[in-house]
Image (cartoon, rainbow, N blue to C red):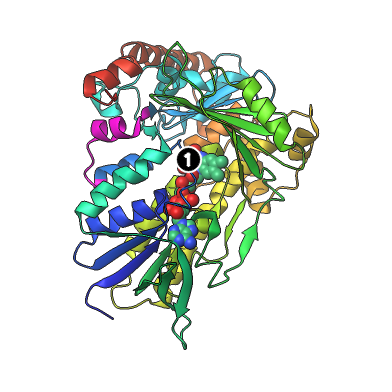
Amino acid sequence: MAERVRVTIVGGGTAGWMAAAALAALLPRKCAVTLIESEAIGIIGVGEATLPHLKAFNDRLGFNEAAFMAATRATYKLGIEFRDWARIGDSYIHPFGAFGNDIGGVGFHHYWHRARAAGQAEDLDAYSLPVVAARMARFTPADTIARAPHGFSHAYQFDSTLYAPYLRRFAEARGVERIEGKVVDVARHGESGDIRAVTLEDGRSFEGDLFLDCSGFRALLIDGVLEEPFEDWSRWLPCDRAAAVPCAVQAGPLLPYTSAIAMPSGWRWRIPLQHRVGNGYVYASGHCSDDEAVAAILGAIEGEPIAEPRILRFRAGRRRRGWVNNCVSVGLSGGFLEPLESTSIYLVQLCVQTLIELFPQDGVAAIDRDEFNRVLDLEYDRIRDFLILHYHATQRSDSAFWERMRTLDIPDSLAEKIELYRRRGRVAQYGRGLFLEPSWIAVYAGQRIVPDGFDQRAGAGSIEAVAKGMEAFRRRTAEVAAGMPGHVDYMMRTGAMAA
Ligand code: FAD
């Protein structure tokens, strides 16, 4: 193998350019990166809502937050609002932060359950600073608040067609070679079956030691060449299409959160950016035709549409193994779970980060490849269960779709988590990864799953004392939120607003 590992990336969407930028910045002397993309094919062009991990990714590459936001027309995001999920009329926010503070090592939610059962607590939302601030369209980063009631983090809502070009400028400045062209053929090493080279329409050929399949749903290498099977999860997540249509920004506050609003055959996203609002109806084609979906989303959006509606087709699931031979699938080629919790770009990031940690400097070792696949498996499974919970924890039966989802046969792994929570509010513990305790609590409580009991230690002390402490916390939260700058004011002040 050459001294510097030759990494050949096929595809220049968000996945391809995130991988290229991170490899160039974090392993500068270890690899030589070539990225091949086809303008004629283009990118998927959706994927506007992110998780706080993206901030860590950008920070790691040294991006200036305000400059990145202005370039991608981004807004801040403090969480995701779920409307009409358990019952029509319900609304809660899954925030990027905890609810309350642990008391003597016991989770706040246990005290909340106790006080709630005694009729002495507000909705859980009232004890979360990011939720209260989001509802008031206020924003400032957590580390700028003196005496914050508790920590929180933030993510972004951005124009997905602008992020890849932003990363491209960064990556090319660090030596990534970009090749324009369409891959039409792939050569393999005889014995190992590893990929040796890809050939373009114009006959040029590019060799590599390691190939990243970032070709989107086409999955050119991982499926087209290596034929790695796809694990289909549509029996649990039957939504398989989206009708997307952006609209003009309306008068009123710019909201620092994404909305996921339940619809008769799925749900719709609403993502406020600086220059437009992203909208899309994610639906199950078995329950709703494309024409019905387009009519429904056009009828639901608040502003003037600024583009023709687009239908996107997908299937829930993932590649059985993401890394096969010397090929790693990153992004949509490796799998897709609907954007209900904004997880796709996070999964790209996880692939890139894990690959860098296990980078095959001296050739691909099976043990590293297995570890990569294990990490990805764990995260996909958790996200899958978390998404199914949103559909399963519903009392709706007002359409065939919701009746189906309410009575769905869920995976055992999720059934166990729900049973554990129902007994005494215990959230299954993971250690690290996505969607830790506060996330599950947000959805359980927001979707009306009420545990039969709580941690026994939260039963100590009088209910009056517990209620008094909670009320003080709620007031402090409301006070701090009211003192935060408006979302737009903060963006104007820091230069995050595009001129
Ligand atoms: P693509 O953007 O499709 O890029 C594929 C690249 O491969 C392109 O450059 C293309 O030109 C190239 N290519 C393909 N074939 C060839 C070839 N033969 N030769 C050369 N080049 C080739 N994610 C989130 O995190 N948040 C969201 O809110 C969100 N919303 C979504 C909504 C919908 C409806 C869908 C479908 C996805 C959403 N996603 C979201 C996912 C997100 O869009 C993707 O994960 C992300 O954009 C990465 O896509 P990609 O780079 O893998 O694929």
Instruction: Determine whether the beta carbon of the residue marked 1 sits less than 8 angstroms from the nearest atom of ligand 1.
Output: yes
Q: Position of residue 456 (x, y in %)?
A: 55, 33
389 in the magenta segment:
no
Residue sitting farthest toward the bottom? 191
Q: Position of residue 327 (x, y in %)?
A: 44, 69
Residue drawn 63% across the image and 21% down it: 300
State which quarter of the image contains the C terminus. top left
Q: Secondary structure at mark 1?
A: loop
Residue drawn 24% across the image and 48% down it: 170
Q: Nearer the viewer, residue 226 or 85?
A: 226
User: Tag 1: Cα neighbours inside 10 Å, few (<14), some, or many (≥20)?
Assistant: some
Q: Is residue 294 above or below residue 358?
A: above
Whether residue 200 is visible, yes or no, is yes
Q: Position of residue 155 (x, y in %)?
A: 38, 34
Q: Which residue is mark 1?
A: 47
Q: Which residues are magenta?
A: 60-75
Q: Amino acid at mark 1?
A: Gly
Location of residue 114 (image quadrant)? top right
Label tally? 1
